[in-house]
Amino acid sequence: MFRYLLIVGLACSALANEAQSGRIVGGLKAGGGQFPFQASLRNLRNAHTCGAVIIGDRWLLTAAHCTIGQQPFNLRVVVGSTDRTTGGESYNFRQIVDHPDFNQVTLENDIALLQTAYPIKMSSMVQPIRMSNSLVLGGQIGTVCGWGASSYGSAAAIFLQYMDVRTLNNGECKLKHNIQNRSKIHGSSVCTYSRVGQGTCMGDSGSPLIVNGNLEGLVSWGVPCAAGLPDVYTRVAAHRAWIFRTTGL
């Protein structure tokens, strides 16, 4: 899956402006229970591939480019630990539901639902997050967390990382990207920026953007890694109707 994420990025952009999946560079180590909704999506080799977010006792959200073409038995999720290498509880999946209008070229509707085979046991370390019901505006302070690489080409972080970011309106976000990458910023996208040397990285795809305690976005793509350009997320509020219709939450 990690190799697949790189291929997606290479196919979507060119040279230094390749849109690579996921990444947190320049972040801080999260404390136990600080982000109890954060989960680690794993492959059959137990390798972390993407982040995921708990939204119910049987349901998680992630990026569709993390799950497209996958079968439920090829993936599992680990919850309840900030250490990627130990602890937590593992759950197999009953089904994977990629957004029916996900576009692998433009990354529009880059969102997927994961249903576990049996209920997730909640605790102080494992809790669902409340989903946003409105489109966040530019200039808001949010937080992004994940186990993505701390630099381009490095391994996934051992400990969950987080950092504060500022949201941008889509017009501002497009102006900061080149013409090719602007085609991957949609009405259902939200962008953030911090500074050069801070940003998401490979392995952060599907991880949450939180604003005012609500799940606002899922890491979709960015120019690797923390290169001084905005990171782009899938807006969760834009997909609430599909999420509720599919899950019955």
Image (cartoon, grey):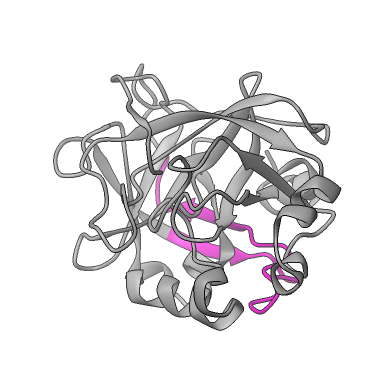
Asked whether 112 falls inside the magenta stretch, the response is yes
Number of residue marks: 0
Q: Nearer the viewer, residue 219 or 249?
A: 219
Question: Residue 211 occupies which quadrant of the picture?
Answer: top right
Image side of residue 198 versus residue 240, left or right: left
68 is higher (above) or lower (below) than 150? below
Instruction: Pick the quarter of the image with the C terminus.
Output: top right
x 75%, y 27%: residue: 139
Instruction: Pick the quarter of the image with the N terminus.
Output: bottom left
x 21%, y 36%: residue: 83
x 72%, y 62%: residue: 109
Image side of residue 119 versus residue 105, left or right: left
7 is higher (above) or lower (below) than 174? below
Examine the residues drawn in magenta and state their main secondary structure: loop
Residue 194 in picture, x, y percent from top left:
56, 35
Question: Residue 101 occupies which quadrant of the picture?
Answer: bottom right
Residue 151 in picture, x, y percent from top left:
32, 52
Asked whether 103 falls inside the magenta stretch, the response is yes
Residue 176 in sight here: yes
x 71%, y 49%: residue: 243
Q: Which residues are magenta?
A: 94-119
Residue 182 in picture, x, y percent from top left:
76, 65
Question: Residue 42 occupies which quadrant of the picture?
Answer: bottom left
Residue 69 in sight here: no
Residue extending farthest to the bottom is 11
Residue 234 in picture, x, y percent from top left:
68, 52
Q: Nearer the viewer, residue 116 or 98?
A: 98
